C-alpha cells in the first residue's frame, strides 16, 4: 500500500528525525507506528543509526509492528526480527542481527540482564512510554542501566499521565537522564507537589502546587509534541452511554455491610478485606455480580449486569459487540449467559481471533482491557463496546475505547458502561473523568501547532 502521509504525520516523522530525544504523544488512531517506522527508515539509510530496538506490549510487538512494516510499500525493505516467545526463539531472533528488532516490554529485563547477549542498539523506540512510569519496575531499572549507550530514543504514547502528573517523572527520566524533571523522584515531588491525602506522617497521595502544571509542561516542551485525533482526523461520532442497574434490597445490604465492616459471610465462607486496596477490588467484584473468597471460589451476589448485557446484545440487532470484562468470574458468567442465549462468541486471545473479528465472523468478542488495550486495530469488526466491569486505569480505559473509536471506523461508535448504582462503579467513573481532565491539560499544553512551526 502506498503511504500518503497527512501533514501531521510528516511533521511527527521529521520531529523524530531531528530530535535525538523525542516524546511523541499521539492519540490513538493517528498512526504512531508508521510515523516512527518512516523516521527509522530515514535514520538507517543515512547511517545515523545502525540498530533499532522497538519495545512494545506483547500483542503489539508480535502483530502490529510487523504488520505495519509489510503493509506499506516504502517500508518493505526494512529488515526486522520479532523477539517474542520462548527464550530460544527470542535469542534466535536477536542473533539474526536485523536493523530493527521488536521485543515485548516484559522481556526488556531479560534482554539486558539475563540473555547474555550484548546490548548494541543505538536507537530505542518505546511504544507506550507510559508502561515505564514505575521507577521501581525491573524494565525501568534495566533500561536505565543501558541508557548511556543509546544515541537516540523515542517515547510514544497516547496516555502520558493516566494517573496524574507524577507519572511523568519516570517516563522523562528514561528519555533525558533527568535533565528536565530531575534525576530523583524526591526532588521532583518537592519541586512540584505537596501532600494531599495523608495519615499523620504517612502520605498517600500528592497534588500539584499552584503553577506546577504549567512549569512541568514548559520543562518538557522542547522535546515533546502532542496531537489529538479530533484535531487531525475525521473521527466517527462517539456516543457515551451509561446503563444503570440496581441491586435489590437484600443484595444492596450484603454490599453495604461488606463496605462498612470489610467482612461478610456467604454460604458459611468468610470473606474479608485486609486493607483499602483489597476492599476496593472486592467491591468492584460485587458490583459486577460475584466475589472471590479466600480459596478463589466465586460467590454469586446478583445477575443485574448480565441481564443488562443480554439486553444490549439483543438491542444491537445482530451488530457485533465487543465486551470488556475485568475479573475471571466475569468472563465465566458472561460465557455461561451467552451459551444460554445461543450466541456465538470468542475470547480475544490470539491473532486468529483478531482476524475473525475484523472479518465480521464473531458476533460477540470478549476482551480484557490489559490484553486488548494497546495498538490492536479492531475497528473493522464492529462499533459497539460494552464495559461490563470498570477499571481505575485511565490508560487502559482510553486505549480500550480506541480499539473501535479510531481512524478507519466507518460507523458511529457507541460506548456502553453498565453502572451498578449505589456501588463503587460510580466512584470509578468519577475518577476516570477527573484523571482525563488532567491528562487533557497536559496534551493541550504541548500540542503541536503545525502552522506556527512551519
Image: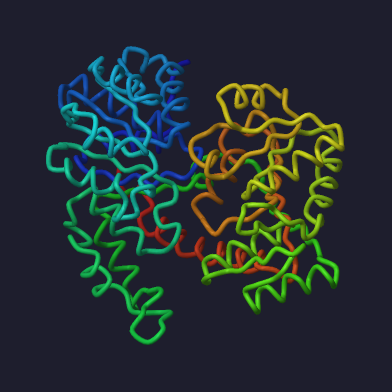
Left or right, 155 with respect to 258, comes to left
Q: Residue at x 65, y 67 (%)?
A: 424
In the foreground, 274 or 385? 274
* Residue extending furthest toward the bottom: 200
Image quadrant of residue 150?
top left
How is this picture coloured? rainbow
Residue 128 x/y as whole percent: 39, 43
* Residue extending furthest toward the front: 268
Residue 235 x/y as whole percent: 59, 41
Residue 45 x/y as whole percent: 21, 19
> Number of numbered discs present?
0
Image quadrant of residue 180?
bottom left
In the foreground, 390 or 447? 390
Residue 94 x/y as whole percent: 27, 21
In the foreground, 370 or 404? 370
Q: Residue at x 28, y 35 (%)?
A: 110
Left or right, 215 with respect to 76, comes to left
In the foreground, 113 or 101? 113
Image quadrant of residue 454?
top left
Q: Note whether 423 is above or below 419 in the view shown.
A: below
Q: Residue at x 68, y 48 (%)?
A: 329
Q: Note whether 324 is above or below 69 in the view shown.
A: below
Amino acid at each position: 500500500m502506498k503511504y500518503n502521509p497527512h501533514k501531521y504525520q510528516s511533521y511527527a516523522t521529521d520531529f523524530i528525525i531531528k530530535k535525538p530525544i523525542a516524546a511523541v504523544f499521539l492519540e490513538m488512531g493517528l498512526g504512531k507506528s508508521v510515523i516512527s517506522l518512516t523516521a527509522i527508515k530515514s535514520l538507517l539509510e543515512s547511517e545515523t543509526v545502525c540498530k533499532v530496538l522497538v519495545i512494545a506490549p506483547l500483542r503489539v510487538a508480535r502483530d502490529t509492528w510487523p504488520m505495519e512494516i509489510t503493509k506499506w510499500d516504502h517500508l518493505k525493505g526494512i529488515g526486522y526480527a520479532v523477539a517474542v516467545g520462548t527464550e530460544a526463539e527470542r535469542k534466535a531472533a536477536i542473533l539474526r542481527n536485523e536493523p530493527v528488532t521488536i521485543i515485548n516490554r516484559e522481556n526488556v529485563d531479560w534482554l539486558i540482564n539475563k540473555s547474555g547477549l550484548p546490548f548494541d542498539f543505538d536507537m530505542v523506540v518505546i511504544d507506550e512510554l507510559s508502561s515505564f512510569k514505575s521507577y521501581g519496575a525491573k524494565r525501568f531499572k534495566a533500561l536505565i542501566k543501558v541508557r548511556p549507550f543509546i544515541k537516540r530514543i523515542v517515547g510514544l504514547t497516547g496516555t502520558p499521565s493516566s494517573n496524574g502528573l507524577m507519572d511523568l517523572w519516570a517516563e522523562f527520566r528514561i528519555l533525558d537522564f533527568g535533565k528536565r524533571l530531575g534525576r530523583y523522584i524526591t526532588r521532583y515531588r518537592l519541586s512540584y507537589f505537596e501532600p494531599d491525602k495523608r495519615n499523620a506522617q504517612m502520605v498517600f497521595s500528592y497534588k500539584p502546587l499552584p503553577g506546577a502544571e504549567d512549569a512541568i509542561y514548559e520543562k518538557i516542551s522542547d522535546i515533546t509534541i502532542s496531537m489529538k485525533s479530533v484535531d487531525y482526523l475525521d473521527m466517527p461520532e462517539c456516543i457515551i452511554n451509561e446503563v444503570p442497574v440496581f441491586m435489590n434490597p437484600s443484595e444492596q445490604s450484603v454490599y453495604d455491610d461488606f463496605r462498612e465492616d470489610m467482612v461478610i459471610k456467604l454460604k458459611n465462607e468468610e470473606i474479608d478485606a485486609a486493607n483499602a486496596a483489597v476492599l476496593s477490588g472486592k467491591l468492584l467484584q460485587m458490583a459486577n455480580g460475584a466475589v472471590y473468597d479466600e480459596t478463589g471460589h466465586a460467590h454469586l451476589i446478583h445477575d443485574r449486569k448480565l441481564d443488562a448485557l443480554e439486553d444490549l446484545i439483543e438491542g444491537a440487532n445482530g451488530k457485533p459487540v465487543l465486551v470488556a470484562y475485568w475479573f475471571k468470574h466475569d468472563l465465566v458468567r458472561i460465557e455461561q449467559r451467552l451459551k444460554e442465549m445461543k450466541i456465538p462468541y470468542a475470547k480475544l486471545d490470539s491473532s486468529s481471533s483478531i482476524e475473525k473479528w475484523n472479518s465480521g465472523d464473531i458476533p460477540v468478542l470478549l476482551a480484557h482491557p490489559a490484553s486488548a488495550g494497546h495498538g490492536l486495530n479492531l475497528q473493522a469488526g464492529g462499533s459497539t463496546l460494552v464495559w461490563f466491569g470498570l477499571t481505575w486505569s485511565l490508560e487502559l480505559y482510553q486505549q480500550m475505547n480506541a480499539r473501535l473509536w479510531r481512524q478507519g471506523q466507518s460507523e458511529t461508535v457507541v460506548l456502553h458502561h453498565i453502572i451498578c448504582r449505589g456501588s463503587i462503579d460510580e466512584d470509578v467513573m468519577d475518577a476516570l473523568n477527573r484523571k482525563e481532565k488532567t491528562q487533557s491539560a497536559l496534551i493541550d499544553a504541548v500540542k503541536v501547532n503545525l502552522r506556527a512551526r512551519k
